[in-house]
Image (cartoon, rainbow, N blue to C red):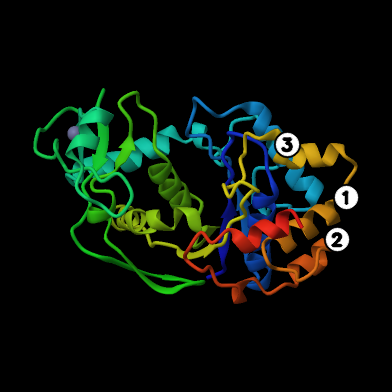
């Protein structure tokens, strides 16, 4: 079976150097393994997604030279598409119906305050204690939660090797849809990876912890889980992840300074530790780098990366 991976930016801001590094991994690994790249618009967050970001992102991708094999491009921007989450409600409804049939979901009426005060002591993230698990509340008008399995999830990460996660202890029964009817990231992205036939997920190590819970969803939806590769991120000079909403860090802004795509790609590759010296990099040379050799360190150690963004 040939490899299909995806580039799935959210429509909540502009692309920045961190996205360029991410695209290098996605296209670089796909090309090295003779696979395909699908581009998808992640706009399940209707309150924060804006159409102008969709256009800017697709335009920046093409200006840089990242052309997907299928999915969204500037030619199908802003028209209905199976590659855009806000057009996927029927598919999500269908998958939710399957989980309902099997008793894997329930309605939850807890406020955030109640969840915080009742939460189990989890390692770092908010862990839902299951307060509403037996209440039999209707799903409509309530948060819809997925009943996590009690078992540990074991999966293979191409960068880290064998990994183990316990969703029940990390986050507890997590939500698939909120009380207003808005789908969540974890549910949409699993459903989309199923409908788009994705068999390798390449993404930043900031969302590594969501892997186990997503694999449980794949299992309950009777779909094969993809393989995973989590790569290091870039940080700005205050040690924070680059922001999509900071126009000053955006590719759109860089383009206005007259910079070339090769310079932008070179900057991202150097910042991410793919080059030992900063210099412009053609797409051909960028695709020849060995992405699979670079291991995520599992920590957000930003110090070395910092110097690389601001040498
Ligand atoms: Zn609840």
Residue 275 drawn above or below residue 264: below
Residue 107 visible? The answer is: no
> Badges 1 and 2: C-beta atoms under 8 Å apart?
yes
The secondary element bearing badge 1 is classed as loop
Question: Does residue 284 appear to the left or right of 26 in the view shown?
Answer: right
Q: Is mark 2 within 8 Å of ligand 1?
A: no
Residue farthest right in this picture = 258
Relative to the observer, which residue lies in front, 192 or 18?
A: 18
| Residue at image coords 59%, 31% | 80
Asked which secondary structure carries label 3, the reply is helix
What distance separates the C-alpha of mark 3 from that of mark 2? 21 Å
Tag on residue 248?
Answer: 3
Quadrant hosting residue 255 = top right
Task: Specify the label residue 280 is tagged with.
Answer: 2
Residue at image point 56% right, 39% down: 10
The residue lying at 45 percent from left, 47 percent from top is 189
Q: Earlier in the sequence, mark 1 or mark 3?
A: 3
- Residue 41 shown left or right of residue 149 in the figure: right
> Viewer-proximal residue, 290 or 272?
272
Where 246 falls versus 191 (above or below)?
above
Residue at 59% x, 35% y: name it. 11
Is the residue marked by circle 1 packed among few (<14), some (14-19), or many (20+) residues within 10 Å?
some
The earlier-in-sequence mark between 1 and 2 is: 1
x and y percent of residue 130 in the render?
A: 16, 42
Tag 1 residue: 260
- Image position, residue 82 (x, y; %): 54, 40
For the residue labelled by badge 2, is the local secondary structure a helix, a strand or a loop? loop
Q: Position of residue 38 (x, y in %)?
A: 61, 52
């Amino acid at each position: 079976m040939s490899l299909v991976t995806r580039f799935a930016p959210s429509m909540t801001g502009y692309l920045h150097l961190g996205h360029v590094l991410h695209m290098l991994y996605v296209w670089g690994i796909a090309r090295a393994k003779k696979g395909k790249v699908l581009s998808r618009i992640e706009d399940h967050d209707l309150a924060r997604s804006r159409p102008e970001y969709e256009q800017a992102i697709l335009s920046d991708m093409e200006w840089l030279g990242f052309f997907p094999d299928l999915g969204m491009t500037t030619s199908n921007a802003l028209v209905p598409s199976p590659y855009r989450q806000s057009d996927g409600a029927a598919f999500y409804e269908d998958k939710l119906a399957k989980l309902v049939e099997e008793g894997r979901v329930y309605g939850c009426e807890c406020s955030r305050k109640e969840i915080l005060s009742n939460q189990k002591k989890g390692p770092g993230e908010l862990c839902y204690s299951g307060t509403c698990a037996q209440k039999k509340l209707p799903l409509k008008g309530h948060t819809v939660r997925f009943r996590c399995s009690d078992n540990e999830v074991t999966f293979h990460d191409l960068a880290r090797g064998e990994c183990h996660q316990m969703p029940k202890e990390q986050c507890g029964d997590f939500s698939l849809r909120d009380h207003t009817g808005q789908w969540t990231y974890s549910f949409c992205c699993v459903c989309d990876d199923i409908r788009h036939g994705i068999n390798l997920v390449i993404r930043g190590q900031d969302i590594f912890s969501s892997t186990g819970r997503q694999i449980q969803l794949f299992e309950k939806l009777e779909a094969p889980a993809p393989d995973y590769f989590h790569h290091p991120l870039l940080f700005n000079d205050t040690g924070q992840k680059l922001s999509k909403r900071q126009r000053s860090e955006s590719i759109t802004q860089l383009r206005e300074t007259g910079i070339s795509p090769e310079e932008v790609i070179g900057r991202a590759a150097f910042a991410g530790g793919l080059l030992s010296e900063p210099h412009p990099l053609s797409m051909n040379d960028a695709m020849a780098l060995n992405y699979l050799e670079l291991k995520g360190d599992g920590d957000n150690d930003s110090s070395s990366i910092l110097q690389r963004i601001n040498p």
